Amino acid sequence: MRTLANRRSRRELAWVRSLPVGRFTGGFCLRWLGPERFRYLPDDDPLTFHRANGEVITPGEMETDGGTITPVLQVLSGMSRWSYACAFMIHDWEWENRLCNGKSFKEVNLTLAEAMRTMQVMGVLPDRSTDIINVYRGVMSVAARRQWHNNSPYPGPATRRIGWVHRSH
C-alpha cells in the first residue's frame, strides 16, 4: 500500500515538474462586495496570462471569491484563497466563460495548474508541488465536475449577488 502511494506521489511530482510555464503581465484590483465576495476589476494594463502554447487569457470584470481552498487544506498547507490570486483569477474567468471558450473541464483545470506552476517558477511563491497537486485534485473532483455541468454562467449567480449588494443600503 505504501509503495502504491509513493509511486503515485512520484508520478504526481513528475507531472507538476512537466507542466508548461507561461508568464503573467499586468494587474487587477478587487472591490469588496460582502463576506468572501469580491469584484475583479482589470487595471489599465490588465492581468494577462500568456500560456506556453501561445494562448493569451485576459480576464474581464467578474465576481470572485479567490481560490476555493477548503479550511482543512488552508490549515494543512498554509495556502489561502488568495495565495495564487493571479492563477485563481484566470481559472475563475475560464470557468465563468466555459460555454463561450469551448474548453473542456480538464483543459480549464490544466490551465490553472500551469498558471500556479508559472507563479512558482517566477519566484512569486515557494516551489511546492503539493500545492498544485492538492488544488488540482480539488478542481477535478466529482463535486467540481457536477458544478461544471450544472451551473450556467448566464446570467450567473454573480449578477444576482451584485444586484443584491447594490440594493442593500
Image (tube, rainbow, N blue to C red):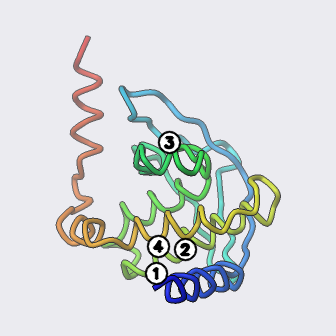
Residue that carries the numbered disc 2 in the rendered image: 111
Which dot, 3 or 1, sits closer to the camera?
1
Counting labels gives: 4
Residue that carries the numbered disc 4 in the rendered image: 109
Q: Is residue 108 above or below residue 40?
A: below
Q: Tags 4 and 1 in contact by the CB under 8 Å rule?
A: yes
Q: Tags 2 and 4 in contact by the CB under 8 Å rule?
A: yes
* Earlier residue among tags 2 and 3: 3
The image quarter containing residue 150 is: bottom left
Q: Tags 1 and 2 in contact by the CB under 8 Å rule?
A: yes
* Earlier residue among tags 3 and 4: 3
Residue type at mark 1 is Glu
Residue that carries the numbered disc 3 in the rendered image: 40
The residues bearing labels 2 and 3 have C-alpha atoms spaced at a distance of: 19 Å
At x 74%, y 53%, the residue is: 125
At x 72%, y 60%, the residue is: 119
Q: Is residue 71 above or below residue 99?
A: above
Residue type at mark 3 is Tyr
The residues bearing labels 3 and 4 have C-alpha atoms spaced at a distance of: 20 Å
The image quarter containing residue 158 is: top left
Residue that carries the numbered disc 1 in the rendered image: 107
Quarter the N terminus occupies = bottom left
The residues bearing labels 2 and 4 have C-alpha atoms spaced at a distance of: 5 Å
Residue type at mark 2 is Thr
